[in-house]
Amino acid sequence: DYKYGFHDPEFLQNYKGTHVIYPFYQALPILEKFQARPGDICVTTFPKSGTTFVSAVVEMILHYGDHDALTSGPFLDEKIPLMDCKESPFTKDEDLLVTTISNRPSPRKFLTHLGYEAIPKSILDNAKIVYVARNPKDVIVSHFHFVRSFVTMRFKGELEDMVDAFIDNKCMYAPYFDHVAAYWKHAQENKNFFFVTYERMCKDLKGVVRDLCVFLDRDLTEEQMDNVVHHCQFDNMKQVSNVNRTSLAEAGYLDFNISHFMRVGKPGNWKEHFSPELNAKVDKWIAEQRARFPDYKLEYQ
Ligand code: A3P
């Protein structure tokens, strides 16, 4: 059954309102045991919204603009690991990911794609959350290329299938709008929350860095902030094997011959992919979803 382009459209399980792949679904009850504490930093995104980009920025800020923060030591995805998985290229034991993070010194850094209802409450209560939202049209295109290159997912569909997968909540971490709208609402009410768009990061990274320094309580000089901005430019990050997810390619998860993880790195790439018909379909979906969340005011570029 190749509906939605996936070999097995039932590979997703609903965990507290978030659709996750089965191995992650099995791991999530373990994550409930995780105790966040003040000082923790949790990068939170819907996948393909700028997770890696903001993770690099956070890591650089914590190291006062020192490029070694990206180029040396473990891969970025080990320094700021995805919590919601059973195993990663670095851990093969179910519990290990959580215990590894638990035993790290402060400031502990980790990331999740889980929706608001599914994220462990202790993280919402105690950690500083850095949330990135991205125009859903670009998220769809980026997601499409990502799953094409994701070996075990065996996605054989077209972009049209990916659009249907988004609309029918048949893609990882769907539903998209519930995700952004719930975190957006939380961000309005909570000072331990930094909400930024991918588009702003691309347009005004210096401004974002400045604001993030305040949020993370780090006092960087102008030069240090400029270093963060410089080294987190797409073309510069793409060169660094520690951050461009070579780790996932080497571990056999991603096939860079199909698509690079660091692919285009610009807002508006959907315009080169969407036919007028597909765009109309997505616009209709967006309008319907906005009607479900009237308080969600974020405008996409
Ligand atoms: P594209 O596929 O549109 O190029 P995530 O890290 O959440 O999976 O998001 C991946 C997307 O962020 C990809 O988008 C990738 O190219 C883009 N990206 C990664 N680093 C970036 C950077 N430094 N500047 C701009 N975009 C970046």
Image: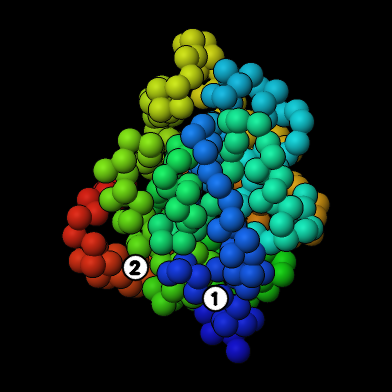
> Label for residue 196?
none
Please determine whether, in this image, residue 284 is positioned above or below residue 94.
below
Q: How many marks?
A: 2
Structural distance between the alpha carbons of marks 2 and 1: 24 Å
- Residue 285 appearing in the image: yes
Query: Which secondary structure, mark 2?
Result: helix
Q: Which amino acid type is shown beneath numbered disc 1?
A: Gln
Query: Which secondary structure, mark 1?
Result: strand
Residue 86 left/right relative to 2: right
Q: Position of residue 182 (x, y in %)?
A: 33, 56
For mark 2, does the 10 Å Cα neighbourhood hold few (<14), some (14 to 19), or many (20 or more) residues? many
- Asked if disc 2 and disc 1 are in contact, CB closer than 8 Å, the reply is no
Q: What residue did someone put label 1 on?
A: 13
Q: What residue did someone put label 2 on?
A: 282
Question: Which residue is at the front of the view, 259 or 240?
Answer: 240
Q: Position of residue 6 (x, y in %)?
A: 60, 78
Residue shown at the point (23%, 67%) measured from the top left: 292
Question: Which of the 4 image quarters holds residue 22?
Answer: bottom right
Please determine whether, in this image, residue 195 is positioned above or below residue 214.
below
Question: Which residue is at the front of the view, 76 or 18?
Answer: 18
Question: Which residue is at the front of the view, 21 or 209?
Answer: 21
Where does the N terminus fall, quadrant-wise? bottom right
